[in-house]
Image (tube, rainbow, N blue to C red):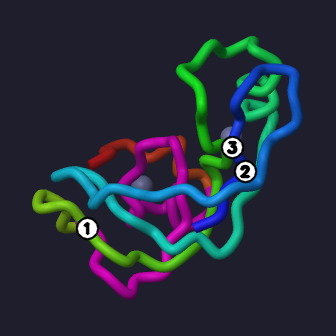
C-alpha cells in the first residue's frame, strides 16, 4: 500500500509503498479510505514529539476492518470504523453524542 512516510524531521513526507505485518493479538488491520493529519502529526514532523523514524503519520482515519488479532472481539472483518486515540466505550450517552473522551467506563 502507499503511505506518506516521515523519514526526517523538517523534511517533506515521502509517498511510497510500504508493507504491513499481520495484526498482533490486540491489533486491527484497517483498509484506510481517508486519513487526516492533525496538529499532533505536525509536532512529529517538526521534531517536537521525538519518535523513531521512519514513521507513517495519520492516526485519525476511517476505513474497513480487514483482519483482527486473536484477542480482538470489539470489531470484525468488514466493519466500517474510525480510529481514535481516546479510550471510550462506544455505547454511553457521551459516546453517542460525539463526546467519547467523557465516557465513564472505557473498555
Ligand atoms: Zn490527532
Ligand atoms: Zn461511552
The residue identified by callout 1 is 68
Indicate which disc, 3 or 1, sits on the residue closer to the N terminus.
3
Residue placed under numbered mark 2 in the picture: 4
**In the image, is the residue at mark 3 within 8 Å of ligand 1 by its beta carbon?**
no
Read off the residue under disc 3: 5
Image point 62% across, 44% down: which residue? Answer: 56
Considering depth in this image, is 94 or 89 the residue closer to the camera? 89
Give the numbered dot on residue 7. none
Residues packed near mark 1 inside 10 Å, few (<14), some (14 to 19) or many (20 plus): many
Measuring 31% from the left and 82% from the top, which residue is drawn there?
A: 77
Disc 2 vs disc 3: Cβ atoms closer than 8 Å?
yes
Above or below, comparing residue 63 to residue 87 in the picture: below
- Tell me how far mark 2 sits from mark 3, CA to CA: 4 Å
- For label 1, the SS is strand
Residue contact at pointers 3 and 1, CB within 8 angstroms: no
> For the view shown, which residue lies furthest in the left direction?
70
Image location (x, y in percent) of residue 5 = 69, 43
Residues rendered magenta in the picture: 74-98
Q: How many other residues sit within 10 Å of disc 3, few (<14), some (14-19) or many (≥20)? A: some
Seen from the viewer's position, the closer of residues 21 and 71 is: 21
C-alpha gap between disc 1 and disc 2: 24 Å
Taking the image as shown, residue 59 lies to the left or right of residue 42, namely left
Residue at 59% over, 26% down: 53
Q: Nearer the viewer, residue 93 or 34?
A: 34
Amino acid at each position: 500500500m502507499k503511505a506518506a512516510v516521515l523519514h526526517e524531521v523538517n523534511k517533506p513526507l515521502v509517498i511510497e509503498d510500504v508493507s504491513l505485518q499481520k495484526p498482533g493479538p490486540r491489533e486491527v488491520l484497517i483498509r484506510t479510505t481517508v486519513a487526516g493529519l492533525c496538529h499532533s502529526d505536525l509536532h512529529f514532523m517538526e521534531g517536537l514529539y521525538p519518535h523513531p523514524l521512519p514513521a507513517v503519520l495519520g492516526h485519525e482515519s476511517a476505513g474497513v476492518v480487514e483482519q483482527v488479532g486473536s484477542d480482538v472481539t470489539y470489531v470484525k472483518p468488514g466493519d466500517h470504523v474510525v480510529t481514535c486515540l481516546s479510550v471510550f466505550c462506544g455505547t454511553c450517552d457521551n459516546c453517542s453524542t460525539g463526546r467519547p473522551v467523557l465516557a465513564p467506563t472505557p473498555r
